[in-house]
Amino acid sequence: MAGDLPEYYFRVRENGAFVFRVDTENRQRRIDMDQIAVVNIRKGEIKPHGERELSAHDLEVIEEWMAERLELVEYRDIDDIHRAVDYLNTTTHWAQSKATDEQLEEVSDALLLAMHDLRTVLVRKKADRLLTGDS
């Protein structure tokens, strides 16, 4: 297993990761993970852990991970929106063909407010794009 392990491990958290250097070259032949940094992808920050100084290689690997992670997060964001459109379509079909009066009473106000809020934002953003010529 040791031969298959990466040199670095990123423990993902909401806005970045804890970065560990993976070490299998020790006398006990066990896996050691030494935390070397904390990464905040929103702020673009890399903070060395403790009194550690990061090497150029450490920084290169971390920056590469940050770029890949940002790309993945952006992909997931738009994928979530496409899924939301699918859920809206499924919800429409459910409301029209399957929902009971009690079920509709339970969710209608919340759905109507959420859809009104979304529509308001989308119309405003579309108007802004049209005014600036970014459509």
Image: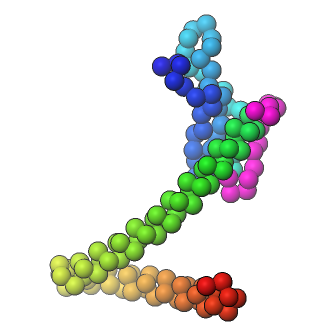
Pick the front one: 75 or 11: 75
Name the colour scheme: rainbow
At x 66%, y 50%, the residue is 67
Q: In this view, does 10 lie above or below 70?
A: above
Q: Based on the displayed image, in which of its 4 quarters is residue 86 positioned?
A: bottom left
Where is residue 111? Give x, y as percent: 38, 82
Where is residue 40? Give x, y as percent: 69, 50
Q: Is residue 100 above or below residue 131?
A: above
* Residue 66 belongs to magenta span: no
At x 80%, y 34%, the residue is 56
Q: Based on the displayed image, in which of its 4 quarters is residue 70 positioned?
A: bottom right
Q: Is the magenta stretch mostly helix, strand or loop?
A: loop
| Residue 66 in view (yes/no) | yes
| Residue that extends furthest to the top in the rendered view of this protein | 27
Compared across the picture, whether 52 is left or right of 11 comes to: right
Magenta-highlighted residues: 41-57
Compared across the picture, whether 8 is left or right of 46 comes to: left
Compared across the picture, whether 83 is left or right of 127 comes to: left
